Amino acid sequence: MLSKLFLKTPLAWRQLLKERTRLLVAVAGITFADMLIFIQMGFESALFDAAVKPHRSLQADLVLINPQFQTLFSVKNFSRERLYQALGYDGVQSINSVYIGTGQWRNPETRLERAILVWGIDPAKSAFTIPEIQQNLDPIKQLNQVLFDQAGRPEYGAVGDIFQKTGKFDTELNNKNVRVKGIFSSGASFAADGNVVTSDSTFLQIFPERQPDRIEVGLITLKPEANPEIVRSQLAAGLPNDVNVLTPEQFAQIEKDYWANGTGIGFIFGLGVGVGFIVGIVIVYQILYSDVSEHLPEYATLKAMGYSDRYLLGVLLQEALLLAILGFIPAFVLSFGLYQLTYTATMLPIFMKVDRAINVFILTVIMCSVSGAIAMRKLRAADPADIF
């Protein structure tokens, strides 16, 4: 019935249009609140996606890691023997290993060093699903040859541009001379501002203190007919408890949980979303409260004519819904543009996602509906006998 009355007499819409300046202020306020929510959600998602992108790029059906592993920033190793033991289980087709360490990359132009994540792999086997790495395994079979992540921070130097022009880039990694023989794109994350992939032999030269039989990640490829969960359960039950057997997604989830719950990052972004939500409620409430206060005699007249509080609440909720839609549209467009700008400037994987847009719109509707419900208290005080 309320929708029919709204179509016959668009009271809510006409009241909003009567004070166009107030309407613009309200829409601007909701847009600001929505953009704050979009930005907080976008940065949180982008940072988490960047943090787990290397995990999800590993070419494996199952992963072996040290049980104390929490983040690539401070990775723990384990004995390679566990990986060979896994090869004896039914369903396991092949194994591979990965070394991980944090090295110091020297920018040859500025001579400044910056921490970078170094991945040591067997160049005879593909450890990553990234095409640029798979296509450039042969060049890194020679010592002191590396593949460089061109999506990392620019402080490492113009590696990508120089390599594409000259076909090489020479620098130092942990005070050892290395040459870039290929580039790929992965991106910066919480753990590191960039990545380097090299052979296991070069890795052990860059990190001479490392023991060859101690690895950071074990990669297990299963036979096509094998059930990953069944094999994972068998390995978890049969292998010693100094290793964990996980799927690549479970491996990535450990990293994500560390940054979301083990640090203040998750709380900070959640707080930002909450602040945006509260700001929106306050702005919409002020607009609706002012509208009710200025039109109190008219509302009292409607009540005297027999219109119930329920109908008048419907009018307020219609105003709130209209404000939610009018504020969400520009917030969506502006946030989309800010995402693109941020990606260009930082290479963070920050993109507009359908589920995020839906969630923000739902939050906007709730935000405006709550404001309308609170403003209804003033409307219920409209007594025709007192006003007239």
Image (cartoon, rainbow, N blue to C red):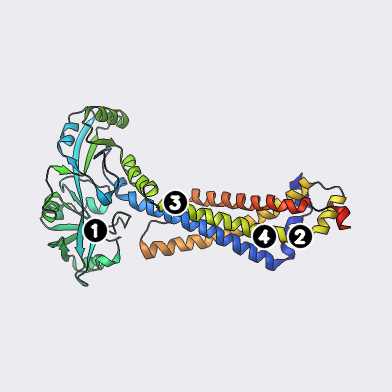
Question: Do the numbered discs 3 and 4 sit on residues whose CB atoms are within 8 Å?
Answer: no
Is there any visible trace of residue 377 in the rendered image? yes
**Residue 251: which quarter of the image?**
top left
Residue under label 2, please give it.
293
Q: CA distance from mark 2 to mark 3?
A: 38 Å
**How busy is the neighbourhood of tag 4: few (under 14 within 10 Å), some, or many (20 plus)?**
some
Question: Disc 4 versus disc 2: distance between alpha carbons?
Answer: 10 Å
Assess disc 2: are there few (<14), some (14-19) or many (≥20) residues with their C-alpha within 10 Å of its C-alpha: some
Cα–Cα span, label 3 and label 4: 28 Å
Horizontal relation, residue 16 to residue 196: left or right:
right
Residue 332 visible at all: no
Q: Position of residue 316 (x, y in %)?
A: 72, 53
User: In the rendering, at what x and y percent does residue 388 appear?
Assistant: 89, 57
Q: Nearer the N terminus, badge 3 or badge 1?
A: 1
Q: Circle 3 is placed at which residue position?
A: 267
Kindly identify which residue carries mark 4: 286
From what the image shows, is residue 226 above or below residue 277?
above
Say what amino acid the circle numbered 3 marks: Phe
Identity, as a three-letter code, of the amino acid under mark 1: Ile
Decide which of 174, 341 is in the foreground and name it.
174
Instruction: State the CA–CA distance, disc 3 to disc 1.
Output: 27 Å
Asked if marks 1 and 2 touch (Cβ < 8 Å), the reply is: no
Q: Secondary structure at mark 4?
A: helix
